[in-house]
Amino acid sequence: MFKAVDRFVRSIDHCAQGRDSAVAELEIFLPAFLSEKALRRWISQDTPFGTPPAHAIFVTVLDGPFNALVLDPAGPKRIVLDRSLIEAALETYAIASDLTDRRGIP
């Protein structure tokens, strides 16, 4: 999967530079950023941005055609969460939420 993510990042870079680029395999990744600095490494233009909750991003990946979530795709430390990791995270979140609700913890 990491090679596919590298191809994806190179393809996006080529498109941003006005060069044609084709991805050999159809794999779709959702990029997300842990900070504004990481976003600016990906796109330097003044772009509006927001901070949605992780749960909403995870659900978007699973509901959409995405193979993985790529955090900070332009580096310096790229993190790839494939669908199975995201499913496990959401299951853990649901279990923790259920326990919290049953204990009356806000």
Image (cartoon, rainbow, N blue to C red):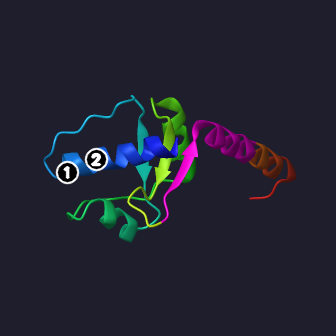
* Depicted 75 relative to depicted 70: above or below: below
x then y, percent, for residue 93: 71, 47
* Prevailing SS of the magenta stretch: helix
Whether the residues at callouts 2 and 1 have beta carbons within 8 Å, the answer is: yes
Which residue occupies 83% across, 48% down?
A: 99
Q: Is residue 98 left or right of residue 89?
A: right
Residue of label 2: 12
Around disc 2, counting alpha carbons within 10 Å, would you say few (fewer than 14), some (14 to 19), or many (20 or more)? some
The residue nearer to you, when weighing 47 against 105, is 47
In which quadrant is the C terminus drawn? bottom right
Which residue occupies 38% across, 60% down?
A: 74
The magenta span reads: 77-94
Label 1 is placed on what type of residue? Answer: Ala
Which residue occupies 15% across, 45% down?
A: 19
x then y, percent, for residue 3: 47, 44
Q: Circle 1 — which element?
A: helix
* Depicted 3 relative to depicted 105: above or below: above
Q: Quadrant of residue 22?
A: top left
Around disc 1, counting alpha carbons within 10 Å, would you say few (fewer than 14), some (14 to 19), or many (20 or more)? few
Q: Circle 2 — which element?
A: helix
x then y, percent, for residue 58: 55, 43
Residue of label 1: 16
The residue nearer to you, when weighing 106 against 21, is 21
